[in-house]
Image (cartoon, helix red, strand yellow):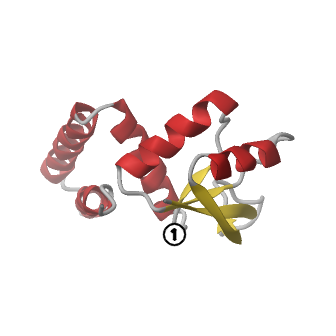
Amino acid sequence: MRNAFAEEYRIYRNIEAAYDRARDEKDEAGLEQARAEMRAFRESLLAKGTDYEELFTAYKDAKKRGNEYIDIDWSIWDENVKATIDRLRNFGIERFTFSSGWSSAVETAWLFLQNGCTLEGMAEINDRSTSFGRDELDKKHAYVFSIH
C-alpha cells in the first residue's frame, strides 16, 4: 500500500505557499482564499476520521522538520502499541522513528517488535525545538522501525 499522506501533504504545502505569497503581496483577497482552502482541507481530513487526521499531522510535522519518517515522540502506553502500529500499517506507513526519552522507552520498543516491527537501527533526527540563539532545529536520537 502506498503512503496515504504524501498527496495530502502536497496539497497542504500548496495552500501554505499560496497564503505566504498573498501575505508577502499584502493581497487580502488571496489571504482569505488561502484561509478558506485551508479550512476546507482540514474538514476533508477530519471527514476521513480522527486517526487519519492525527497521523497526517504527525506526517506533516515530520516533513516540516526535514525528517523522513513519522516520529513517535508522544506518550504511548503498552495497550496503545498494537493500535498505533495497526493505524500506521492501515495508512501505508512502512517506517517510523521512535524518539521518546522517558524511562520505559526500551520496553515500548520491545512491544513494537512484538507487534510486527523490525528494529532497523538508530538515526539522528530533527527535534521540534531550537536552542536559544540558533535558527536550526535541535537534533535528537531515535530508533528506526519498519512495519511488516
- Disc 1 residue type (three-letter): Glu
Which corner quadrant of the image does residue 53 belong to?
top left
Please rate how many residues cluster around mark 1, counting C-alpha atoms within 10 Å: few if below 14, some from 14 to 19, many from 20.
some
Front residue (pair 111, 127):
111
Residue 34: x and y in percent read 20, 49
Q: Which residue is label 1 attached to?
A: 68
Which corner quadrant of the image does residue 16 belong to?
bottom left
Q: Residue at x 34, y 40 (%)?
A: 52
Residue 41: x and y in percent read 22, 43
Q: Is residue 81 visible?
A: yes
> In this view, which residue lies farthest toward the top?
79
In the figure, is residue 89 to the left or right of 27?
Answer: right
In the figure, is residue 111 to the left or right of 16?
Answer: right
In the figure, is residue 70 to the left or right of 49?
Answer: right
Front residue (pair 2, 128):
2
Residue 136: x and y in percent read 66, 69
Q: Residue at x 75, y 62 (%)?
A: 140
Q: Is residue 138 visible?
A: no
Secondary structure of the residue carrying tag 1 is loop
